[in-house]
Amino acid sequence: MSDLLSHHPVTDLVPEGHYGPDAAQPGLTAQVVDGLALATVAARKGASGALAQAVLDAFGIALVDAPKVSFLGDLSFIGTAPGRWLATAGGAPAAHVARLQGALADAAALTDQSDGSLIIDVYGPKARMALAKLVPLDLHPAVFAPGDAAATAAALIPLVVWQLNDMPAYRFAVPRSFAPAFLRALVSGAAEFGVTVSGTARG
Amino acid sequence: MTRFVDGGLIDRTRPLAFTFDGQAYRGFAGDTLASALTANGVRLIGRSFKYHRPRGLFSAGSDEPNALVELRTGARREPNTRATTVELYDGLDAASQNRWPSLDFDLQAAGGLFAPLLGAGFYYKTFMWPAALWEKLYEPVIRRAAGLGRAAEAPDPDAYEKAYAFCDVLVIGGGAAGLMAALTAGRSGARVILVDEDFRLGGRILSEREEIDDAPSLQFVARAEAELAAMPEVRVMRRTTVFGVYDGGTYGALERVGDHLPVPAPFTPRQRYWKIVARRAVLCAGAGDRPIVFGGNDRPGVMSAQALRSYAVRYAAAAGSPAVVFANNGYAWSAAFDAAAAGVPIAAIVDVRAEPPPVQMERANRRGIRVIAGGEVIATSGKLLSSVTVRARGRTETIAAQILAVSGGSSPTLALTSHFGGKPVYRADIAGFVPGVLPPGLSVAGAAAGEYSLARCLAAGAARGAEAANDLGFTARATPVPQAQDKPITVSPFWHVAQSRGLAFVDLQNDVTAKDIAIAHQEGFRAVELLKRYTTLGMATDQGRTSNVNGLAMMAALTGQDIETTGTTLFRPPFTPVAIGAIAGHHREKDFRATRPTPTHAWARAQGATFVEAGLWLRAQYFPRAGEADWLETVKREVTATRASVGLIDVSTFGKIDLQGPDVGRFLDRVYINTFSTLAVGKVRYGVMLREDGMVMDDGTTARLADTHYLMTTTTANAAKVYQHLEFCLQVLWPDLDVQIASVSEQWAQVSIAGPRARDVLARIADAPLDVSNAGLPYMGVAQGSVMGGIAARIFRVSFSGELGYEIAVPARHGAPLARALMEAGAPFDITPYGTEALGVMRIEKGHVSGNELNGQTSVADLGLGRMASTKKDHIGRVLSERPAFRDPDRPTLVGFKPVDPKDRLRAGAHFLRHGRSAVLANDEGYMTSVAFSPTLGHWIGLGLLARGPERIGETVRAYDPVRGADIPVEICRPGFVDPEGERLRV
């Protein structure tokens, strides 16, 4: 176990701050993102086509049934399983679910998950190297690029990850109760490159 | 000092201080511990495993069988490290092991006198009888004598980690073949990872004075390294050992990030455990020098010919002078020539071949080196080697020598090729085994494939590298190849000097002698696998890399079979030892597994809760108050307060599964034993689900929120398992059903309030128009609305405690505010937070089953729930729940128990016996599953499974608990000690 976190309660999110060698610029940042509403969207039996059409009609988004991000503006559909997506958008959970419900209820089951996961963005020049210690995915830019997604496990924690841009920045949806353990594993491995943790003070 | 004044790949401007057995020495950057000891004239490095014989260095690589040492001190102490692979650093503190009182004088070496008694099968034969002595005497004695080195006695202060890497072509080994494979594949644009266990690339090139393209071969290495470093898609990993080949092109590798430093650099691990996923791999692991078996071949100073060369050429050191070379092949001669050129006087080359190749004779002649052709070493002498006795053409001669460099040929380093079961194949022309059937995607190049000579290694590396890249659609060219002028060597098979004096060792690490092979043969352990296990040949850290071939060749000679027929054992991962800490990585101590806090964790901590692990969750166990003597007093208070007024507990850890779709009712009817399609909207029902084999899998309540929308709860322990089960049912069993499920366990915080004043508390936080009156929200009802001024909530009127109860669910971020709001609203009623202990007491008082009863061995009938099962429909587990064994009326069935003497304490795990029956298994009638002290009744109560239990209410039986020395009479009663009619639930 790394000394870095050994005196910190395992039940709490890793406190905000810089971990690792002092450097003008951190190798990466791990930031808890607030204010994002989440919902699972699961296509009804035999309604994949209808769902895709409804998403296109209502939101102008061409829904891809694959581990990809389909998005327009701040509304994103992240493919997590065949016929299943995690839909994210800014704003209040109730409004997000209501908006989806209004457009998609006939073609999909919708479930609010805004409190089920913590959204954690990991970005910076060393993000890829740090995540190589955490995520069992090939994050080489030729293999995993902005718009790619995966439902996987990291440090024995089930989660969803997708790439936002080629900074690179990755967004993780981590089940709420696993977020402290996820951040512990991330920071332990990333400290070598210098990692700044932010957004964890609000708990 | 035995360091040469110049030469070698050491940096004489960077001296390093180190100690061995407390003695201070100096080496240089670029040394290994072994080379630095050699340069300091230290020839005695350790004591052997079984006979405690003095041993020196045999090799200069990871196949070292002898020189196992302890490194560092205190918490970082690390036993059984091969001195040949330890990169020297300033301040290194090393010690010999397996000796007492000192390395030079070891008392147990007296065991050597009894060596004839300690041969193969000694333990099997000696400790057979009397069997009663095994546990008390033999095993402790053997355990004390066994094992090498001492583990650290304090927790390892260093960090370890895991990492993943991906590539098109993985090249294992950075010698001539590996460099060419990596260059060739890398130039094609393929993603390449080159892994080498040394801290310096080059492999054997570093230890040989060969030329490539008419220039010193080191220049080739430097150019190759520079070119590889400049390729963006190529990654070079030094100090890294590929230790195993696994499914799907996965390779395990261990990177020694900080082993060459006194302590790892800040924020970096000591070691890193890599999983490398490679579409193709090229094994370029080279070959190792093989010993020859003869009397006295383990004396310090006897080493492999290539080790002599490595120490002389790479490290500019020799462990004495002069050297005699004993061999059967030309590669050993070139080693002698290189060593001589570096400064080691060669007294003689003894070759078993009567007529060595003339070209070699001429080279020896030119260097003034004496050759004894047709000769054999038949004895050695000196505690540290001082002379060797050679017999040739009938004459015997003793030659003074401090080094005897031996080579019986080369053994390709092919361990990784047999990790998928591929058996190595014998090739008589090189007198060695080469890889057989290879793991998928792996090819072999250079000496590892039996392609000896630098020229062939360069060409083969390029060819295999190009093939691997081209296979994947890249365009790689295997030519042109840098040229070397050396020729493949010739070898004349030779294993064993039968007529020699003294113990002749086959396996230096395990002290297996030629005589042990003969014993194994004589006693019928002739197959190689039996030979290995009977004699321990080829076991332990070196996996027989220096010993296997000689051992089986000698067995072949004894049985009269050829070596091919005799065969060889396989190698298993890991190739070299891997520390458990590296395998664990981040996951140790508090990070062994994730700790999951509940939504109210911080609130409970502030209330002074004591926590308990429930799977990965941490739950409040009880909330002690000042002045309470122990947990029992606290729990009694929590139960009494709840039953008298109202209590509160976080139940967020229950699994929660959202089910939507027109077929959910039908689906649940098949999953549960009871019917859910008829459940009215706004109602909750308790359900039990079975495994296919008829055993109870889980229980919980499911609510119907809307016509096509249900919400299931599961036990905390089975949350993931039940979700997985439902996914399986929907994807595999009934893909036609239109049902969508989603886990919402993390989405909703759920707090339960229970007790006669629960409704009063709830009413104070419920927002209008939510009606929580008995009529508005009756028992087993669910209401949706909001609480605390606008927070969406679902309220389930269910009870585990037996009291009027509600479970209030809010989005998880509002979990702690909900607990605080309930505490505030409940203040007038003295609301009491309680933990899992009080919850457990109340459910036992109520007679509810829980994890102790839902243990995977019980049926619904066993639990008294048989009448719940609908007979009008099929459900999972129905058929097998009608097995005869399940219908046996003697099956232990759930009942309650109370002690006949109210002062007696009940113990879970106690077995039931009829009075007067002896305490033997045949009389066993079942056991106590759960017990609690009931504050409500003032004595202990229990639940248990008893044969024909429900028919025996009122009888007494013995509760027999030999583990804790209890044997008390208990009365059988109905489960349900408090409010058996359930009146409190409905008020």
Image: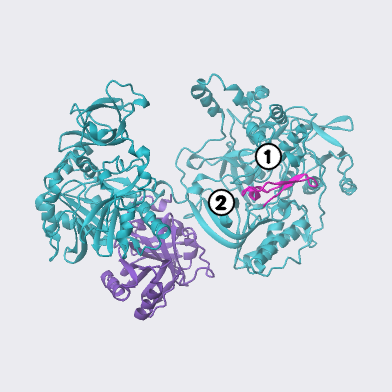
Res. B527 in view: yes
Drawn colour of chain B?
cyan
Q: Is residue B418 magenta?
A: yes
Q: Is residue B876 depicted above or below B548 in this figure?
A: below
The residue labelled by disc 1 is B57
* Pick the front one: A100 or A29: A100
Label 1 packing within 10 angstroms: few (<14), some (14-19), many (20+): many
Q: Sequence order check: which comes first, mark 2 or mark 1? A: 1
> Mark 2, residues whose alpha carbon is within 10 Å: few (<14), some, or many (≥20)?
many
Q: Residue B363: image x %, image y %?
A: 87, 48
Measured along the vertical axis of the image, is residue A61 above or below residue B370?
below
**SS at mark 1 in the image:** loop
User: What residue do we see at 29% from left, 72% from top?
Assistant: A101
Question: Which residue does the numbered mark 2 point to in the structure image?
Answer: B256
Q: Amino acid at mark 1?
A: Leu
> Residue B256 at what x, y percent from top left?
56, 51
Q: Are marks 2 and 1 on the same chain?
A: yes
Callout 1: chain: B
Label 2: state its secondary structure: loop
Tell me where residue B284 sits by quadrant: bottom right
**Left or right, residue B231 beside residue B778:** right
Relative to B496, is A185 above or below?
A: below
Res B901 → quadrant: top left
Amino acid type at circle 2 is Arg
Please say if the residues under marks 2 and 1 sit with CB atoms less than 8 Å apart.
no
Total of numbered circles in the picture? 2
- Residue placed most toward the observer, B131 or B40: B131
Q: Give residue A91's position: percent from left, percent from top.
A: 29, 73
Q: Colour of chain A?
A: purple
User: Which of A117 and B368 lies nearest the eye of the viewer?
Assistant: A117
CA–CA distance in space, label 2 to label 1: 22 Å
Which segment did they paint magenta? B412-437
